[in-house]
Amino acid sequence: MYTHAPTPTLAKENGAYYTPLAVADSLVRFAVRTPADRLLDPACGDGRFIALHANSVGVERDLVAAEKACERAPNAKVYRGDFFHWAETTHERFDCAAGNPPFIRYQLFAGETRGRALRFCRSLGVSFSGLTSSWAPFLVAAAALLRQGGRLAFVVPASIGHAPHAAPLIEYLVHHFSTVRILAVRKKLFPHLSEDCWVLFADGFGGATEHIEFIQVDCFNNFEERLALDSSKLVPVREWRDQWRSRLRPYLLDDAARSLYLNATQSKSSVRLGEIASVGIGYVTGDNSFFHLRPSEIEHWRVPAELIHPTVRNSRLLPSEVLSSSTVEDWRQSNQPAFLLRIPKCANLPPTVQSYLNSTRGEKARRAYKCRSRTPWYSVPDVRIPTFFLTYMSGEIPSLVRNDAAATCTNALHAVHLNNGKDTDRLLQSWRSPYLKLSCEIEGHPLGGGMLKLEPKEAARLLIPPPRLLPFGSEAEVHRAIRTLRGWRHYD
Ligand SMILES: C[S@@+](CC[C@H](N)C(=O)[O-])C[C@H]1O[C@@H](n2cnc3c(N)ncnc32)[C@H](O)[C@@H]1O
């Protein structure tokens, strides 16, 4: 028996969410063609996949789960330990692999296991960044253990449709399998988790393809019917890569809606937000409650006005469309902690401010990680005055708010700096356009629980249409496309 890692216990750390039996059964039926086929589940949990086929091998690093797998699948071989450690050294090869790899985000997918996973994938010619989630390297490594003609059938997170680390995986698959099929499933495979899951099938290891077969189903139960109807959309790999930045999510739209959006982006009078502005995040204090003062505290510690700057500490403080000096006055009147202690690096500190820095709150703040790692600890870097504030998590559409009060903001918001002052009105106007709304859905990504998230790079790609109505399609079509994508992120 192979033993390598200790037994981690937390389901979240381990990505240990077991697959519904009906789904496991369908995946194994796709993967296994003859009783002699050798099946691998690289993260077998309690053994529900390997129990479905006698000639199976499972790997599992949780010793308790591995024990259950042995009981459930007495004919299978179960290796205990880290899959990547085993994959690096094993000479075993398989006709097929099926399962549900752990979805462990990069913050927890760390240390030796991640190092080994990324090294193993690099040796296969696949480079994942340090921000990759664990599932993508699992699939590459499992594929590399297949024999010629082999097959994969795996549950994958729906982020295969947009995450940057999905791109190197899909590139690997289309270069090593003759068929790659991705099934988008709208209703949750795991009803108790916020994460949406899709399914990946690949066939003909050793081949290659220029298309990704993309199928949409409302719920997993009827996917076999849909396969039989052969209702897949053939997505040309080149188009996926060049026109849609290696994202499959836009293919949830029909062809007419996708080309309507492409036409709009290619119009001479449209621009991307990143062409007229820079989008970044606000400052990080290290201890928000110490650095954000209420007017009563400013008075108590007698902090001079030149060391204070109004700030949007979180998106709840934002009014709609324009933040003016009267908003700041309202914050002052209601004693909001919305005033940043902004001390330049070489400032002469008045004794009153010095006593605030030496107070119990100051003693605590200076020990915070961010404060410890800068000099002087009390000087918050990257405090800028953006032209607009942009929220990055939203239900319907992110809010864009013009900064008429020369306020600053924390990293709870995106800070948008216009390259020139002229486009301010155009930007505010475009925010009401349905094209902009569609653009948020296409360029942003779902976050679970119906929310839409925009990373700075995604925000920079937002389409700013010309002020007058575009000739590319009716508003009704645009609204239909918006509804479709909102439906897929469960914001109905
Ligand atoms: C999502 S569960 C899936 C289990 C099973 N395949 C299923 O679908 O029911 C993922 C499993 O991967 C295991 N795991 C996490 N990291 C691993 C690693 N580096 N090597 C082997 N197993 C690992 C977890 O303990 C967990 O049981």
Image: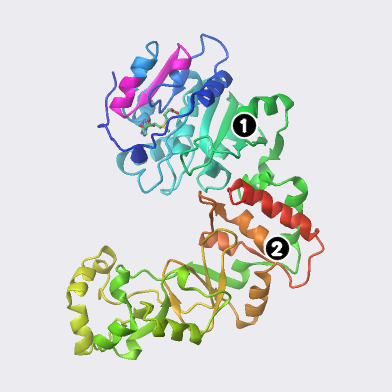
Magenta segment includes 326: no
Q: Nearer the viewer, residue 347 or 489?
A: 489
Left or right, 301 with reference to 454:
left
Q: CA distance from mark 2 to mark 1?
A: 34 Å
Number of other residues with Cα within 10 Å of mark 2, as a class: few under 14, some 14 to 19, many 20 or more: some
Front-lying residue, 386 or 329 = 329
Q: Quadrant of the N terminus?
A: top left
Q: Quadrant of ligand 1?
A: top left
Residue type highlighted by circle 1: Val
In this rendering, position of residue 255 left or right of residue 291? right
Q: What residue appears at the point 27 percent right and 28 percent down from the top-left corner?
A: 4
Please indicate, yes or no, whether residue 253 appears anywhere in the rendered image: yes
Q: Point out residue 190 in the picture as x, y percentages from the top left corner.
A: 49, 36
What residue lies at 50% left-to-right and 86% top-to-bottom?
326
Check disc 2 and report the residue beneath it: 434
Q: Which mark is residue 426?
A: none
The image quarter in which residue 217 lies: top right
Secondary structure category for the residue under label 2: helix
The x, y position of residue 315, in whole percent, is 47, 68
Residue assigned mark 1 = 180
- Placement of 338 over or under 350, stated as above or below: above
| Position above or below: 127 against 261 | above
Mark 2 beta carbon near ligand 1 (under 8 Å): no
Res. 243 in view: no
The single residue placed furthest to the front in the displayed view is 334
Percent position (x, y) of residue 158?
54, 42
Specify the segment rendered in magenta. Answer: 51-68
Q: Earlier in the sequence, mark 2 or mark 1?
A: 1
The three-letter amino acid code for the residue at tag 2 is: Pro
Find out whether residue 52 is within the magenta segment: yes
Front residue of this view, candidates 323 and 127: 323
**Image quadrant in which you'd find residue 375:** bottom left
